[in-house]
Amino acid sequence: MRELDECRTSTNYDLAALITACIAMFLFKAGSRNEMNNLREEKRFRKNYQRLFKMPLPHMDTVDNVMRQLTEDQLQKLTQSMVRALLKKKIFHNQRLFGEWFVIAVDASGIHSFTECPHEQALHKDYSSGKSSWHNMVLEAKLITANGFAISIATEWLENPEEGNYDKQDCERKAFKRLAKKLKSAFPRLPICLVADGLYPYQGFFEICSEYGWGWIVTFKDGNLPSVWEEVKSLCQLTSGNQRKIILRQQDNVIEQNYTWINDIDYHGVKLHWLECIETTTDKEGQIIENRFVHISSYPINWNTAPELSRTGRLRWKIENEGFNTQKNHGYALEHKFSRVSYLATKNYYQCLQIAHIINQLLVFSKTFQSVMQGKMTLKRIWGKMIAVMTERKLSVTKLAQLTGRPCQIRLIN
C-alpha cells in the first residue's frame, strides 16, 4: 500500500492511512461515509482503531478527496497483489479443476442507477414513456471455489467514451475483451478455466480463450448456437454409451443425477464438448424437483470427468450469490453511492470494497470462525458484537502485539 503513487500536493495523513480507512469502512460494514464518521466520533472506537491498525482514523471527507484523485488502476493492482500472495501460499490449490485449473467466473452487474445523467460515460436506457435512466455497470472476474470464496481478480467498467462520441453503447461482450486482456496481463501464467452464463457461447469468446490458453465451461441455453444444437440432437442417439448415473443421499433427500455428453462438435473450427445433467431431488415426503443443467466446454468429457465438469459449470452462481448478492445485501452496501459527484471515486470505492471482502472471506471461511457460527449466531450479529467491542472496550496493546507478533496459519473449511 505504501508503494502506491502519491496523488496529492499537500498531505496531513499518509496515503496508506487514508486507503486503510476506506477499506476499514467496508471491513466494519459501516454502510456509508457518514456512518463511518459517526463511529469516528466515538472516542473509544477512534483510539481502538489506532491501536488495531497503528494508524490514525481520518475524517471520511478527507478520504473522499483521495478517492477522487487516485488513478483507477492503482487499487486494482493492490487487489491483484493480494491475490498473488494468496496463490503463492497455495490457499486455493485444493479447489482447482482437475487439480490444475483455477476457476474464474465472469459476470456483469448493475451497481447504481440514476434519473439524471451522473457523468458522460454512464450507460443510459430510454423508455417509451419518454423517461430515461442512467446506470453504472461493472464486469467482474472472480476466482471462485466450491467452499465459498468469490475473490475479485480483475474489474472492467461498462462505460461509454468520455468524449461522448459513439454509435453504440458499451456492452458486456465489448467489456469482456478488455477484461480478458487485463486478466492475462495480471496473471500471465495462471492456469485459468473461465465459467460464464449463456451470453458467452460466441465465436469471439472462444477465440480469446484459445489465444490466452484458457479453458472454459459456459451455460448452454436452448437457442444458443442453433447449428450446435442440431448436431447434439442428431448425435444423441448415436452416442448412447456416453451416459452416467449417480445417486446421492443428502440428509433426508435422495438426489439422482443423469449425465449425457457428446464430444468433438465442430463450430467454425472450434471443438466444443456438450454436457447435460438432469438432476432429480426427492425429499422425505416424496416431493420431486427436477433441474436440468446444460454446458459446453473446452474440456473433453468422459465417464470420470462429467460430474466434476458439471459441478464446476454450476459454480458460476457463486459470482452472483457469494459475490454480487453478498456485497449488495449483506453489509457492504455495494449499491450505495459513496460518491455522487466523482465517477473516479466510485471506481476506487469499489476496489476498496473488493479488498475488504477478500479479507473478510479469509476470516469467515476459516474453521475457527465457523466454529463460532453455532445455533442462532449470524454474521450480522457477530459484526454487531465486533462494533460493540470497538466502541465500548479498550483493546489491549500488549495483547494485540502478542497476536500480531506470532506466526498465524488460517485453516479454511473444505
Image (cartoon, grey):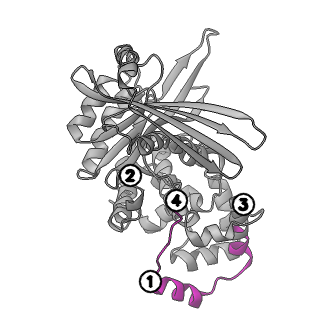
Magenta highlight range: 387-414
Point out which mark residue 378 bears.
3
* Position in image of residue 91 (x %, y %): 41, 64
Q: Point out the frontmost of discs 1 and 2.
A: 1
Q: Secondary structure at mark 2?
A: helix
Tell me what residue is drawn at x 48 percent, y 46 percent: 345
Q: Is residue 36 visible?
A: yes
Q: Residue 272: x, y in percent?
A: 31, 28
Question: From mark 4 to mark 1, how far is it between C-alphas?
Answer: 22 Å
Does 360 appear in magenta?
no
The residue lying toward the viewer, choosing from 409 and 125, is: 409
Marks 1/2 in contact by CB < 8 Å: the verdict is no
Say above or below: 254 vs 224.
below
Badge 3: how crowded within 10 Å, few (<14), some, or many (20+)? few
Q: Which badge, 4 or 1, comes first in the chain's sequence?
A: 4
Along the line of sight, the residue nearer the viewer: 179 or 363: 363
Contact, mark 1 vs mark 3 (Cβ under 8 Å): no
Image quadrant in which you'd find residue 111: top right
* Residue 396 in magenta stretch: yes
Marked residue nearer the N-terminal end (1 or 2): 2
Q: Nearer the viewer, residue 233 or 220?
A: 233
Q: Secondary structure at mark 3?
A: loop
Q: Residues within 10 Å of mark 2 (few under 14, many from 20)?
A: many
Q: Which mark is residue 407?
A: 1
